[in-house]
Image (spheres, grey):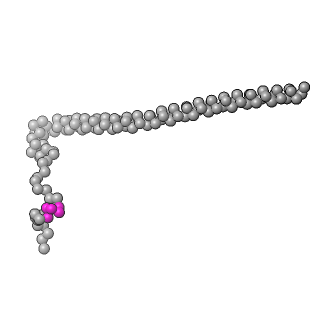
Amino acid sequence: MDHHFPPNPADAQYYNYPTTPSPESLMDVNTIVDLLNGFGVPVCLAGILLWFCKYQFDWARKEREAYAVREEEKDAKIISMVEKSSDALLSIKIAVEQLKQSVDQNSQVIRELILSKGR
């Protein structure tokens, strides 16, 4: 039994058979042969290499731009964390100064009490 039948038109509703030939995105063989004959292999290879260099340069630029965006977001987070930590340190400094003042006041009161008891 031969299994190489053309696709059944009734199956088109269930399967995606190509109805029209797809256009070729690359050059056909005749165009490539004509270019090679007209310009020569070294010139054609130089053109291909120049195109490849430009392609890599453009791809690297896009990658750097995406990296820069990510870095800006990370920098903003780090700056926010630094600001919060400096605010926390400032509030700790203020609390320590207040604690020092209250200890100094208590020390003064205790000195006065000791002096008043000694008399």
Give the x, y percent position of residue 66: 34, 37
Is residue 46 shown above or below 13? above
- Horizontal relation, residue 110 to residue 55: left or right: right
Q: Is residue 13 magenta?
A: yes
Eyeballing the image, is 116 above or below 57?
Answer: above
Q: Which residues are magenta?
A: 11-15
Between residue 12 and residue 23, name the one nearer to us.
12
For this view, does 72 lie left or right of residue 54? right
Residue at 66%, 31% in the rendered image: 96
Question: Is residue 78 visible in this depiction of the protein?
Answer: yes
Report if residue 42 is visible in the image. Answer: no
For the C terminus, the image quarter is top right
Q: Position of residue 76 (x, y in %)?
A: 44, 34
Residue 75 x/y as whole percent: 44, 34
Dividing the image into 4 quarters, which one contains the N terminus?
bottom left
Q: Position of residue 43 (x, y in %)?
A: 17, 35
State the residue lying farthest toward the bottom.
1
The structure residue drawn at horizontal position 48% and vertical position 33%, both measured from the top left corner, is 79
Residue drawn where x is 62% and y is 29% of the image: 94
Give the quarter of the image for residue 39: top left
Q: Answer with left or right where residue 106 lies relative to residue 90.
A: right
Q: Residue furthest right?
A: 119
Pick the front one: 47 or 105 = 105
Residue at x-position 80% and y-position 30%: 110
